[in-house]
Amino acid sequence: MATSRWPGDRLLFGGDLNPEQWGPETLEQDIEAMQVAGFTFATVGVFGWALLEPRPGTYEFAWLDRVVDRLHAAGIVVDLATATASPPPWFGRLHPEAMPVDRQGLRLSHGSRQTWCPSSPDYRRRALQLVERLADRYGDHPGLALWHVGNEFGCHNLMCFCDRSAEHFRQWLRDRYVDLEGLNEAWGTTFWSQRYGEWVDVLPPRATTAIPNPSAELDWRRFCSDAHLEHYLAERDLLHRICPDTPVTTNFMVGFSFTGLDYHRWAPEQDIVSNDHYLGHHLPHAHTELAMSADITRGLAGGEPWILMEHSPSAVNWQPVNLAKEPGQMARDAMSHVARGADVVGYFQWRASTAGAEKYHSAMLGHAGTGSRVFAEATELGAVLRRCAPVAGSRTEAKAALVYDWPSLWSTDAEATPTQEHRYTDEVRAWYDALWRAGATCDGVGPEDDLSGYSLLVLPSLHVVSERTAAAVAAAAQAGAQVVITYFSGTVDERDHIRLGGYPGAFTDLLGVRMEEFAPLWVGQVATLGTGGSPRVPALHDETGRIWTERGHAETGTEVVASFADGPSTGSPAVTRRQTGSGAAWYVATRLSERGLDALVAHLVGEADLDTGWPERPVGVDVVRRRSGQQTWTFVIDHAGAGARVPLAGTDLVSERHCGPTEPLALAPGGVAVIHSVTGRNGE
């Protein structure tokens, strides 16, 4: 892994610089303003292919030479993009067969971005030619700190249904299943007369008359992720060969708006994991979705620091209503990511465009210029990040983990499930929000990750489960973890085949419940929970469940914490607990309300003996710790806007004031504090 040129001794601050949109005189103005704002990091060239190669085989680098030279001279490290995200207009004219085809068979045309087929050999060839030229020219440049391959892979061209993609898909299936017998078994093709006798008949799941084959759809989603990964690896390997000391990354999109790539497969191929995150203002708790994205990204990074490559200074341009961020929100959002492991705070973009599809997207230097509120807040944030430089390289503390899985998402949200009201990310977010409210910082991990070492393990609707994952979850409970699993988990194997013997399938024996039938609820219908004979969580005994119930029974030795008192599953267990080893395995067979989730999570946090850092913190205040050796940095972020008196001991790096139980820090409404303490010093 190449990381030797990466400046990991400080927190970096910057964003996307697109000088090609402006005249050369603007660059000097930009660099001067960047230095005022405290810029130390700039991404360059993301959408520069048309200028770098204006005609096929003719390369023009003078403009980029000047940009990289000037940034280096100003002390701003360069994240140089390979510019392969969007080919120039001439590419579609010369290679029309490389334009993507949608599910209905319509071939798309140049005119926006990412208009290329992930399986196209012509695209691969042209892209690698450009990457090689860039690597040869800038590989030894002292300002180069990072290579940035493509941009947001799959954001707009996730799937292509052309004939070349069909060939690529068939080869991917051969590698996975070896022969047609293996494929037919995996896809269950005896159903609806779909059995294949020739490979040539195997096609991508194009538009068809009825419900498509679920197993084929799941493999298609896996293939699409792998097809993009294959291209990323081609660029990365070329860069590693020419520039072995410079790390390579590409920006993920872990968040509510994109679910197309399985980043658990991508993350091990990154020298440094990076992510783009944009707030969903329509979400009821947008700041906790931000935190969840950061926690999942940290999990992808194996707990190591990661790069926040992009987020927005204020409004975006692509949501139905693009809300401007409130005063102070820029710092709260950024520092929430830093608290959860980001060592780089990057924005899209530096200077706001005056033309093009993103001209209404906010920027650090907006249309109003350096006199704007956003620029002033950016400058203030730059100063805070400089004062927080010692945080770089430390790790976020988490003894809880939430398992997040892209194949489970794809399978759960497919057609012909028990209810379309159940959506995977809704269940995940509901549990994450409750953990956030309880103050339980958690790692976002994959089902094949190491699940040992956690005191609390949450598996919301983990639908697709391998034998290996089932065994690892059972081992975690046996070793002392509180494991909580929710409905529609363990139901199918990796082929999307139902596990027989009752629900929740792979977890039936661990949980000691055997459900016979799913009994979902109508839209707006609720099912009342009552006592199951256990007083363990009494708040659940007058709770209501939504979306989902199940009919079945708890086996001997399984404690029924709450049962369904009415609705289609009256008398069946709704929440159960089974002691296993020194831990316990819980099952929740419905979508609990916020109140019910808070009661259950508070109990789980207590049983897991989790340290939440500040047990009596006010509602809406986030408390997260990063640690390195004896040093701890406690991030306190007020999302409620009510302010707080912080009784933690240490020095606040934001206000540069000492604080402690006898002189608590007065956190301003909507404010941020980063309290540094050293274990064993002065009683701290």
Image (cartoon, grey):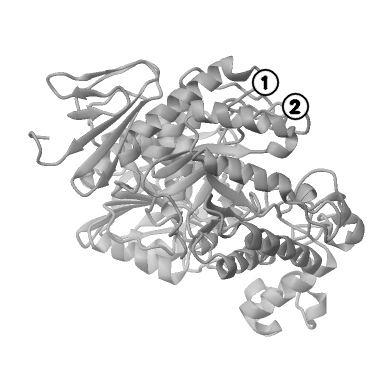
**Pointer 1: what residue?**
367
What SS does tag 2 mark? loop
Q: Position of residue 225 (x, y in %)?
A: 63, 61
CA gap between label 2 and label 1 equals: 8 Å
Q: Position of residue 41 (x, y in %)?
A: 51, 41
Callout 2–callout 1 Cβ contact below 8 Å:
yes
Instruction: Using residue 132 as the reference point, say whether residue 199 is left or right of it.
Output: right
Crowding at mark 1 (Cα within 10 Å: few <14, some 14-19, many 20+): some
Q: Position of residue 348 (x, y in %)?
A: 60, 36
Let me know if residue 237 appears in the view: yes
**Pointer 2: what residue?**
354
Residue in front for this viewpoint, 542 or 567: 542
- Against 514, is 561 above or below? above
> Which amino acid type is shown beneath numbered disc 2?
Thr
The quadrant the C terminus occupies is: top left
What SS does tag 1 mark? loop
Image quadrant of residue 407? Answer: bottom right
Residue drawn at (36%, 63%), measured in percent from left and top? 450
Q: Position of residue 489 (x, y in %)?
A: 47, 56
Crowding at mark 2 (Cα within 10 Å: few <14, some 14-19, many 20+): few
Instruction: Using residue 379 as the reference point, say whether residue 513 is left or right of it.
Output: left
> Which amino acid type is shown beneath numbered disc 1?
His
Residue in front for this viewpoint, 39 or 84: 39
Image quadrant of residue 318? Answer: top right
Residue drawn at (63%, 19%), measured in percent from left and top? 369
The residue positioned farthest toward the left in the image shown: 683
- Against 646, is 440 above or below? below
